[in-house]
Image (cartoon, helix red, strand yellow):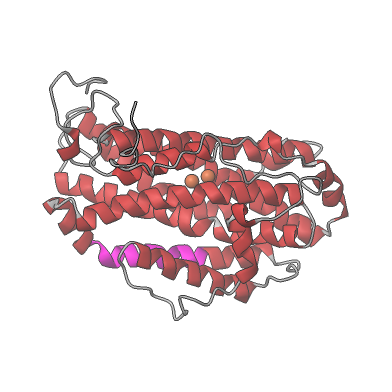
């Protein structure tokens, strides 16, 4: 392996993964421009948790009932685990094998933004709890979290193991390697597209009730990033399905269809169990275990459709069971007077690439 391939290679014709090793990081021509767009958008959305004040959240938290505290803290623990995985795994698993520069840059930005998410949980925890260790040190003591942690990391670990063997020039079957990559991508799609959503809904329900609003705002910024990350795995999967013409991957995708549907089903069931665990001492205004169950099914159908698979739940695609969550997912739609609250709906360094070849036709210098 080399960090700069000396060979001349046309990377606009290279495979997404496992092609010729990369050399120049150039961003003027692309095989798949969508990954550069996703990088630009992620960078434009850059934010820091310290920009959001949690002063009121601290006193709000003291006023919460025990069942509400259980919901809030448990979600925080679970999300801390999920983002710890995501703040590390894309760089360890996918980065060594990516062979188009626009996706390399996109994965680095993706992983970096995930570390902002982990930092934001530290920001929330440090501001709300008198002893942050009460939350951090107990994440791995919670059986309901451990039960799901295995599913979150399993496919990543398998791909990393085979990938490392490949890097060490040990014998690895190509089919097994592609299968591990494909299932890791699916598991990331599930992680970012389904697993966060029960926690998101609870955070936004607190926000709707004007409780823990600072935390809800931070979570809405995280949700905005997650939408970009979700698009990354969706587009990689779509490229393989429609453009790459990769025989091994095409066979893997066909062979694994049943396993993939089962992965979505398992994740949906686990999220339903999580909702039950959260609401075991009492639910929240606007939410209930069955409602969250319907919501997770609705979201899972959407995710399956987006990667060209069939929806598996009997849910209409237009009927969102939690329509009030929508504006939290689109923070650009939040209309607040600046004196009322903090505005987080800005884009830093955002650019619009809408200049065509003849835009300056009438100009003369
Ligand atoms: Fe994240
Ligand atoms: Fe993410």
- Measuring from the top left, give residue 238's x and y in whole percent: 28, 56
Q: Is residue 354 visible?
A: yes
The residue sitting at 43% across, 38% down in the picture is 40
Tell me which corner region of the image, top left, top right, bottom left or bottom right, holds residue 136.
Answer: top right
- Measuring from the top left, give residue 170's x and y in whole percent: 17, 31
From the image, which quarter does the C terminus lie in?
top left
Q: Nearer the viewer, residue 224 or 268?
A: 224
The residue sitting at 87% across, 47% down in the picture is 59
- Measuring from the top left, give residue 77's x and y in whole percent: 64, 47
The residue sitting at 63% across, 64% down in the picture is 325
- Measuring from the top left, give residue 169's x and y in whole percent: 17, 29
Does residue 244 sit above or below 27 in this rendering?
Answer: below
Q: Is residue 305 magenta?
A: no
Instruction: Say left or right for 181 vs 142.
Output: left
The residue sitting at 69% across, 52% down in the picture is 216
From the image, which quarter does the N terminus lie in?
top left
Q: Is residue 262 magenta?
A: yes
Instruction: Say left or right for 91 vs 182.
Output: right
Is the stretch drawn in magenta largely helix, strand or loop? helix
Q: Which residues are magenta?
A: 256-270
Instruction: Say left or right for 331 vs 312.
Output: right
Instruction: Say left or right for 355 vs 278.
Output: left
């Amino acid at each position: 392996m080399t960090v700069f391939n000396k060979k001349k290679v046309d990377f606009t014709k290279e495979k997404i993964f496992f092609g010729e090793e990369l050399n120049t990081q150039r961003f003027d021509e692309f095989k798949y421009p969508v990954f550069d767009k996703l990088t630009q958008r992620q960078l434009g959305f850059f934010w820091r948790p310290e920009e959001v004040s949690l002063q009121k959240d601290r006193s709000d938290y003291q006023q919460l009932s025990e069942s509400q505290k259980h919901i809030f803290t448990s979600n925080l623990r679970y999300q801390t685990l999920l983002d710890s995985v995501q703040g590390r795994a894309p760089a360890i698993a996918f980065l060594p094998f990516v062979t188009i520069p626009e996706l390399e840059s996109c994965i680095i930005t993706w992983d970096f933004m995930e570390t902002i998410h982990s930092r934001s949980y530290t920001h929330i925890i440090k501001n709300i709890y008198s002893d942050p260790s009460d939350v951090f040190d107990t994440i791995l003591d919670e059986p309901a979290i451990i039960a799901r942690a295995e599913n979150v990391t399993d496919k990543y670990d398998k791909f990393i193991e085979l990938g490392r063997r490949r890097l060490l020039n040990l014998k690895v079957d190509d089919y097994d390697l592609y299968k591990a990559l494909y299932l890791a991508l699916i598991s990331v799609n599930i992680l970012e597209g389904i697993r966060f959503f029960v926690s998101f809904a609870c955070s936004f329900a607190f926000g709707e009730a004007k409780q823990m609003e600072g935390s809800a705002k931070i979570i809405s910024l995280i949700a905005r990033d997650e939408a970009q990350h979700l698009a990354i795995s969706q587009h990689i999967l779509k490229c393989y399905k429609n453009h790459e013409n990769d025989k091994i991957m095409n066979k893997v995708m066909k062979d694994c269809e049943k396993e993939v549907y089962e992965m979505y089903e398992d994740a949906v069931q686990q999220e339903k169990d999580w909702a039950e665990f959260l609401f075991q001492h009492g639910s929240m205004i606007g939410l209930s275990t069955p409602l969250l169950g319907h919501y997770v099914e609705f979201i899972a159908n959407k995710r399956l459709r987006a990667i060209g698979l069939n929806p598996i739940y009997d849910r209409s695609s237009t009927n969102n069971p939690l329509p009030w969550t929508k504006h939290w997912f689109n923070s650009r739609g939040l209309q607040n007077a600046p004196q009322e609250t903090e505005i987080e709906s800005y884009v830093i360094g955002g650019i619009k690439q809408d200049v065509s070849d003849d835009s300056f036709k009438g100009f003369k210098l």
